[in-house]
Image: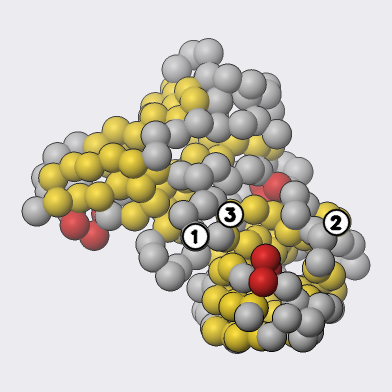
Amino acid sequence: LAKTTQPISMDSYEGQEVNITCSHNNIATNDYITWYQQFPSQGPRFIIQGYKTKVTNEVASLFIPADRKSSTLSLPRVSLSDTAVYYCLVGPLNTNAGKSTFGDGTTLTVKP
Amino acid sequence: NAGVTQTPKFQVLKTGQSMTLQCAQDMNHNSMYWYRQDPGMGLRLIYYSASEGTTDKGEVPNGYNVSRLNKREFSLRLESAAPSQTSVYFCASTTGTVGEKLFFGSGTQLSVL
């Protein structure tokens, strides 16, 4: 399973765009990249998932370069409620995604 | 729908006691997982069940046992609790197909004294 590396923490202010980068140098051909968000005292929640190029949904965008050795989660115009831990997971989706390794995540703190 | 339901939400045990954490999902998912999360750290996989009737070890299985009672329920048992097992335990489920995503319960805070 691919190992991921993320910054331990990031600070931002309300209304700014936040980009969190995840490195996954040994990503395999059949691996997908998935991001989860976790608030204190809650289980992680799915944010976005992608394989290559760019994926966008109602809450975030995911940018994946051609070599797929990294990925960037982009949160537009963050608010205080976006303060959470963000996890990048890399693993094959068709064989037990739950086996993908959770790293220590990135703690995002949004300030007023 | 309730999603993934875990019971209890909080539990305090003495060293050597046993207990079972319960997890149930109502999404007709095939695969279920148990994780533990220690303070300030990510989740580590304890055991998982790819489908009803099967279970496999994850990254940190020692000291735990699991039972996939039926498609809905997946329980985690601590036979002889140790202080090192003090953690937050999360259950999750997925469809088990391509494009799947994990759905998590709200967790069980376990303290072993």
* Residue name at image x 60 percent, y 85 percent: B11
In the rendered image, the vertical position of residue B29 relative to residue B1, given as above or below: above
Dot 3: chain letter: B
Badge 2 local density, few (<14 within 10 Å), some, or many (20+)?
Answer: few
Rendering quarter of residue B7: bottom right
Q: Is residue A54 visible?
A: no
Dot 1: chain letter: B
**Where is residue A9 shown, x and y percent of the image?**
34, 41
Q: Mark 2: which secondary structure?
A: strand
Pick whichever, B29 or A3, lies toward us.
A3
The three-letter code of the residue at mark 3 reads Leu
The three-letter code of the residue at mark 2 reads Asp
**Where is residue B28 shown, x and y percent of the image?**
69, 70
Q: Is residue B32 left or right of residue B42?
A: right
Q: Which residue is mark 2?
A: B56
In the rendered image, the vertical position of residue B62 relative to residue B65, given as above or below: above
The circle drawn on residue B39 is 1
**Label 3 vs label 2, nearer the camera:** 3
- Give a yes or no on whether discs 2 and 1 share a subunit: yes
First in sequence: mark 2 vs mark 1: 1
Task: For the C terminus of chain B, give its image quadrant.
Answer: bottom right
Q: Is residue B109 left or right of residue B58?
A: left
Dot 2: chain letter: B
| Residues at discs 3 and 1 in contact (Cβ within 8 Å) | no
**Mark 3 and mark 1: span between their CA atoms?**
10 Å
The circle drawn on residue B43 is 3
* Residue name at image x 27 percent, y 55 percent: A83
